Amino acid sequence: MDNSPEQQQPQGQPPAPMKKNEPAPAPAPGTDLAAELRAADADRERVADLLRDAYAEGRLTVDEHAERIEAAYNARTFGELEPLTRDLPSHPGPIRHNLTKPPLDAPAPAPQQQPPLPPARAESPTMIAVFGAAARKGRWRVGSHLKAVAVFGGVEIDLTDAVFESPEVVIEVVAVFGGVEVRVPENVTLQGSGAGIFGGFDVREQTSPDPYAPVVRIKGAAVFGGCEAKPKRGKKLKEWVRRQLEG
């Protein structure tokens, strides 16, 4: 009878436990560990900017843009963010992250200098749309008063990238069988005091936590027309009079 220790394990017995010096099993082929990492606010904001650019270029419809923006801000991992821009030319490519930490004595990377912004445009304080449309967006200078008149037409005012030259901006709206749409950054104070006569005057008011942030006041009337003013999610004002004075 062979009593050597190399004899086969009796049937019905559980397999012997793995020895400590044996390597752990490798992950299944095709598993992307980086896709399971938690996404930060900056990662969600980067994807949202790509989606806004695609919408402005006409690559996404209104519904597609709204659906993907909502999914971007609700995403928890990189794996949930990546499919949102996969079919866009500006897609950043597969997620690849270095999971190792640099040594403590490694030199800090040199800060990247941001290219200087182009000068803000000077625009007229009056916008008129009669049987047509008028829009103002991008980097432009907005003063203390702006008047928008829409008669059988539409006026679009986008303040999200504007340079505020006054701590308070009053927008006077006159909409007759037309509409006026106003978009403001999410970190300014928005107030409204208009009237809708056989129409709508909808101002989604908000108060900025910064007491020195600019204040945008919407007033006027909409007769058989409409006025809508609300903050644009994900867009924050970076230049205003207080910061310019502080230099």
Image (spheres, rainbow, N blue to C red):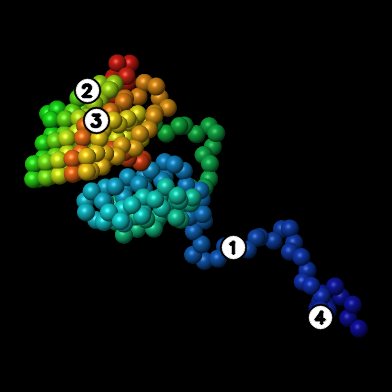
Q: CA distance from mark 2 to mark 3?
A: 14 Å
Residues tagged 2 and 3 counted as in contact (Cβ below 8 A): no
Q: Is residue 150 left or right of residue 2?
A: left
Residue found 17% across the figure and 35% down from its top: 174
Q: CA distance from mark 2 to mark 4?
A: 88 Å
Q: Position of residue 99 (x, y in %)?
A: 52, 47
The residue to which callout 2 is attached is 144
How would you rate the neighbour count of disc 3 (Cα within 10 Å): few for under 14, some for 14-19, many for 20 or more?
many
Identify which amino acid the numbered label 3 is placed on.
Lys
Give the number of the disc on residue 160.
none
Nearer the viewer's eye, disc 2 or disc 1? 2
The quadrant in which residue 199 appears is top left
How would you rate the neighbour count of disc 2 (Cα within 10 Å): few for under 14, some for 14-19, many for 20 or more?
some
The residue to which callout 4 is attached is 11
Give the number of the disc on residue 26.
1
Image quarter (top left, top right, bottom left or bottom right) of the N terminus: bottom right
Residue found 87% across the figure and 75% down from its top: 4
